[in-house]
Amino acid sequence: MKTPGGNHLFTIILTGLSGAGKTVALNALEDSGFFCVDNLPTSLIRSFVDLCYRTPAIKKIALGVDVREREFLTDFSNIIGSLRRTQRVEIIFLEAQEDALIRRFKETRRPHPLGYRDIKKAIHHEAKLLSDIRGLADRIIDTSPFTPHDLRKIITRSYAEEGKTPLSVTLISFGYKYGIPQESDILFDVRFLPNPNFIEKLKPLPGTNAKVRDFVLRHKNTGEFLKKLYSLLNFLIPLYKEEGRSYLTIGIGCTGGRHRSPALVQEIKKSLKGKNVRVSIIHRDME
């Protein structure tokens, strides 16, 4: 997107719940060519962005903001509105399920930024404080099932050489019994297909196994579903590219996320070859 004055500046505001992976994501953005600053005081944000805007060599910046910057939280919409008048701005909100956040705080033995001794109470309070910002986010990523390496890979694939690389498509297989992936842009429910879980010899096998894949794919409804899905993606992907989006996350869900959805995700990946997109796969609940 061309900004006034001829400069091309892309600004990412990275925020979210403490323990959800902001540091990992910010480091990944830095390695992807972004000029990154963490916890910049609110009073300096506008002047800092203006300086970057007037510096032709700087094309991409990322600002990490967390709950400690209270002034930013109260004036968030005004700050973002001001920034968006001169450049493209994208808000990324990182979150994770309560049990994942508690586990991470225990592993790192670091106190919560809000200072509560009760981690659960701190998580709930922080989520409430950030609820308005979450509602304004362009992208919400639930990092619960991700290792730091997984999150880094997702960020890097989405934003490396932004504007020059192909659209990054992430295919996520999941089980509805464990909740939908909050970061998904599009969701498809494939629970209407025959379930290998009820076949004794297939039950212990993952959806990436050839026997499970063949069982799922040979059903007539599977073929018809994939045909219509491919047609939809062929229609949508060029439109997402035209819009200037750098990523698309597609969730494919079955009951437990072990058989049908992984099998279909593997098949969908094959169909995207030659479409000038970068494809990554996450089998969230297969193991």
Image (spheres, grey):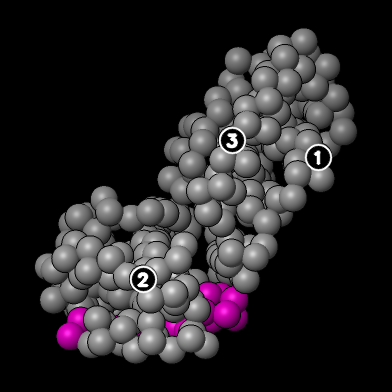
Residue 61 within the segment the image draws in magenta: no
User: Which residue occupies the extreme front position in the image?
Assistant: 5
Q: Residues within 10 Å of mark 3 (few under 14, many from 20)?
A: few
Residue 58 percent coordinates (x, y):
49, 84
Tell me, yes or no, whether the two marked residues, 2 and 1, touch with CB atoms within 8 Å: no
Query: Dot 2 corresponds to which residue?
Result: 4
Q: Residue at x 81, y 39 (%)?
A: 270
Q: Amino acid at mark 2?
A: Pro
Q: Secondary structure at mark 3?
A: helix
Residue 210 - label: none
Counting residues from the N terminus, which is met first, the one under dot 3 or under dot 2? 2
Counting residues from the N terminus, which is met first, the one under dot 2 or under dot 1? 2
Tell me, yes or no, whether the two marked residues, 3 and 1, touch with CB atoms within 8 Å: no
* Residues rendered magenta in the picture: 27-43
Instruction: Give the CA separation, mark 3 to mark 1.
Output: 17 Å
Residue 198 appears in the rendering: no
Query: Dot 3 corresponds to which residue?
Result: 236
**Left or right of 62, for residue 285:** right
Residue 126 percent coordinates (x, y):
22, 64
Q: Residue at x 37, y 65 (%)?
A: 89
Instruction: Give the CA separation, mark 2 to mark 1.
Output: 41 Å
Of marks 3 and 1, the one in the foreground: 3
Residue 87 appears in the rendering: yes
Q: Secondary structure at mark 2?
A: helix
Q: Residue at x 80, y 22 (%)?
A: 217
Residue 270 - label: 1
Instruction: Give the CA separation, mark 3 to mark 2.
Output: 29 Å
Residue 30 within the segment the image draws in magenta: yes
Residue 35 percent coordinates (x, y):
48, 84
Q: Amino acid at mark 1?
A: Lys
- Compared with 203, 97 (above or below) is below
Q: Residues within 10 Å of mark 1 (few under 14, many from 20)?
A: few
